[in-house]
């Protein structure tokens, strides 16, 4: 079972302008900022069996400009173009990756994996099996409740920041509303700035897409639903866990 293709952009990725580092961190007048990048995988209908919501957390005091520079150099040295990273199209050879040979797509995946491994970020992915009965509650309601529980469990962490900025491409409207309600109910409205987060513009939106893709691939391996394409890109389950999952899980926010 391959998950449905996500929207993709034909525009080239650019280094984001929202990341910075301050030599006066902790000093008078310094604003402590946290950015949360949100992505989704699957659909709320019957096309996919699973639905995932991924959150990537980045504290603005940690500059990622150097990591972006190293990633861009790696892309250039590997003779790859700067196509914005989209997990499902890359794996399945669709959209902007349609004309790229499988070995070229593997190089794209490899360079992006290394980029993610070195980033000073944390993440959390929520996974839903749509075959499970949610009773009278819709999927959006369940997502909202789970996000509220998670955010309240980490409230002391979130309250350290003067500003919490949410970057989200909007996704599917029913889920967008659930995410907004959960976050606004847990964090002061004055501390939240919602921003559109097209993956072609923000690298960490692409990272949120990556973590959703890796966690979905793990679920497919666990349930013996992996495809020939999954095996071609990741090898056997043991290789996938060693080379991708375990390294990513070091960044998982419990």
Image (tube, grey):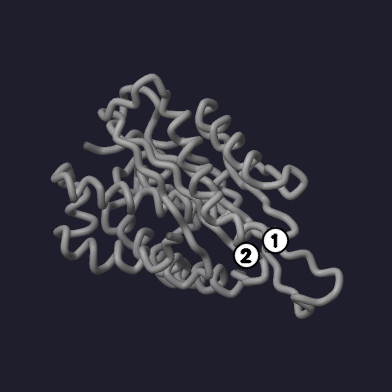
What is the distance, in whole Å, between disc 2 and disc 1 at their CAs? 9 Å
Of 202 and 37, nearer the camera is 37
Residue at the disc numbered 1: 161
* Residue 40 horizontal side relative to residue 66, left or right: left
| Residue at the farthest bottom position | 23
Residue 170 lies in quadrant: top right
Residue at image point 72% right, 46% down:
188
Q: Is residue 21 above or below residue 205?
A: below
The C terminus, quarter of image: bottom left
- Numbered-mark total: 2
SS at badge 1: loop
| Residue at the farthest right position | 29
Residue at image point 68% right, 53% down:
164
Of 74 and 22, nearer the camera is 22
SS at badge 2: strand
Q: Position of residue 175 (x, y in %)?
A: 50, 31
Crowd class of label 1 (few under 14; some 14 to 19; many from 20; radius 10 Å): some
Q: From the viewer's perspective, is the residue at label 2 or at label 1 nearer?
A: 1
Q: Earlier in the sequence, mark 2 or mark 1?
A: 2
Residue at image point 38% right, 64% down:
113
* Residue 151 horizontal side relative to residue 214, left or right: right
Mark number displayed over residue 246: none
Q: Position of residue 58 (x, y in %)?
A: 58, 62
Q: Position of residue 216 (x, y in %)?
A: 31, 47
Q: Position of residue 178 (x, y in %)?
A: 54, 32
* Residue 136 horizontal side relative to residue 232, left or right: right
Residue at the disc numbered 2: 59
Residue at image point 44% right, 54% down:
124
Crowd class of label 2 (few under 14; some 14 to 19; many from 20; radius 10 Å): some
The N terminus, quarter of image: top left
Q: Is residue 35 above or below residue 117?
A: above
* Mark 2 in CB contact with mark 1 (< 8 angstroms): yes
């Amino acid at each position: 079972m391959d998950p449905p293709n996500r929207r993709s952009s034909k525009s080239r990725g650019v280094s984001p302008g929202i990341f910075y580092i301050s030599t006066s961190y902790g000093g008078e007048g310094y604003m402590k900022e946290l950015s949360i990048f949100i992505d989704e995988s699957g659909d709320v209908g019957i096309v996919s069996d699973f639905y995932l919501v991924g959150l990537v957390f980045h504290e603005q005091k940690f500059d990622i400009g150097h990591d972006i520079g190293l990633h861009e150099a790696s892309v250039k040295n590997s003779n790859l173009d700067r196509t914005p990273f989209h997990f499902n199209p890359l794996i399945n050879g669709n959209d902007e990756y349609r004309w790229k040979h499988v070995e070229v797509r593997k190089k794209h995946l490899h360079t992006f994996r290394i980029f993610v491994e070195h980033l000073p970020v944390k993440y959390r992915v929520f996974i839903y099996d749509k075959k499970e009965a949610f009773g009278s509650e819709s999927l959006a309601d369940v997502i909202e409740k789970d996000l509220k529980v998670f955010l309240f469990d980490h409230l002391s962490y979130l309250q350290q920041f003067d500003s919490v900025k949410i970057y989200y491409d909007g996704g599917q409207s029913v889920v967008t509303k659930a995410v907004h309600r959960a976050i606004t109910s847990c964090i002061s409205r004055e501390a939240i700035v919602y921003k559109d987060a097209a993956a072609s513009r923000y690298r960490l939106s692409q990272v949120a897409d990556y973590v959703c893709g890796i966690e979905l691939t793990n679920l497919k391996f666990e349930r013996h639903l992996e495809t020939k394409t999954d095996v071609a890109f990741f090898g056997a389950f043991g290789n996938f866990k060693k080379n991708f999952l375990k390294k990513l899980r070091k960044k998982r926010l419990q």
